[in-house]
Image (cartoon, rainbow, N blue to C red):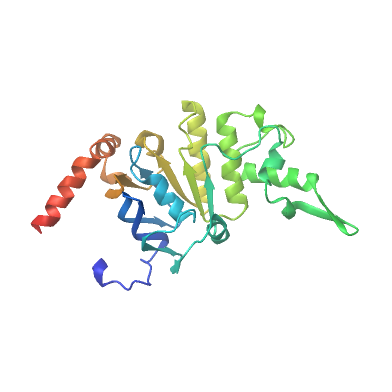
Amino acid sequence: MDRQNQSPTRLTDGLLLEARGIGKRFGPVEALVSVDFTVGYAEVVGLLGDNGAGKSTLIKIITGVYPPDSGQLFWEGEPVHFRSPRDAYERGIATVYQDLAVVDLMSIHRNMFLGREHLVTRRLGPFRFYDAGRARREAQLALRDIGIDIRSPDEPVMMMSGGERQSIAIARGVHFSAKLLILDEPTSALSVKESAKVLHYIESARARGLSVIFITHNVHQVYPVADRFTILSHGQSVADLRRGEASQEQIADMIVRGHELLAELRKAERED
């Protein structure tokens, strides 16, 4: 069906998220130009592009940090307007940034329930207290669900490796019933061995029905787990490919040649 003839209030079948025709301007700078982006159910999508491509701006719109200037977001078949990150979180969107938002001196279980301590409390008279025993058990089970056995849930996060820290952030998203997990450059500062662990955690999350957006400028980091790749350049979409449609080298070339591809797309549109 021709996109122009689709109802503006209907989501394409089978999609968890659709960002349709998203535009965003900051003063004279056009950060996004009519960008289309989709995520299916239990799908891992690599969001690729060089620095300044528009990846961060698009994600901030999806997570409610910025409102779009034009276009529409759809979530599970309905148009949505996220006014804040809390709106997005309440719909089931969890974001793991590069800094991970973990507290090094806190234990694993305290970090798992950071900001959500009310979910593991017990009542004593008129007061409620953090139930450390319950938090320990739930943290250990949540991590085990994505394939990691920790030494102790009381261990400070500062004693863990980079890959293990990522596992806490991913397990947090799975445990708190996220439907879409957004990972910002999750393997950029990790060794090859630690990166492989994180990719395994992502696959485990997908097997449990979670969808993932993996943001990176390096296709080699995401290629082993992604089902599909969306490439941005200068705030515009230049390609949307399934994994079998292009090799790592071809996708890497598209990232580098983004400006040329945009020029070719504009030329083709003029000729049509």
Taking the image as drawn, is residue 1 in sight? no
Please state the horizontal and vertical placement of residue 172, each as a whole percent of the image: 61, 46
136 relative to 216 in the view: left or right:
right
* Up-down relation of residue 187 to residue 181 (above or below): above
Please state the horizontal and vertical placement of residue 13, each as a whole percent of the image: 37, 66
* Up-down relation of residue 197 to residue 65 (above or below): above
146 relative to 107 in the view: left or right:
left
User: Which quarter of the image is occupied by the C terminus?
Assistant: bottom left
User: Which quarter of the image is occupied by the N terminus?
Assistant: bottom left
Please state the horizontal and vertical placement of residue 69, each as a whole percent of the image: 37, 60
In the image shown, does 185 or 70 lie closer to the viewer? 70
Taking the image as drawn, is residue 84 in sight? yes
The quadrant where residue 216 appears:
top left
* Up-down relation of residue 19 to residue 265 (above or below): below
Please state the horizontal and vertical placement of residue 121, each as a whole percent of the image: 79, 53
| Residue extending farthest left | 271
Instruction: Give me the residue at 80% from left, 45% from top.
Output: 133
Count of numbered tags = 0
| Residue extending farthest front | 27
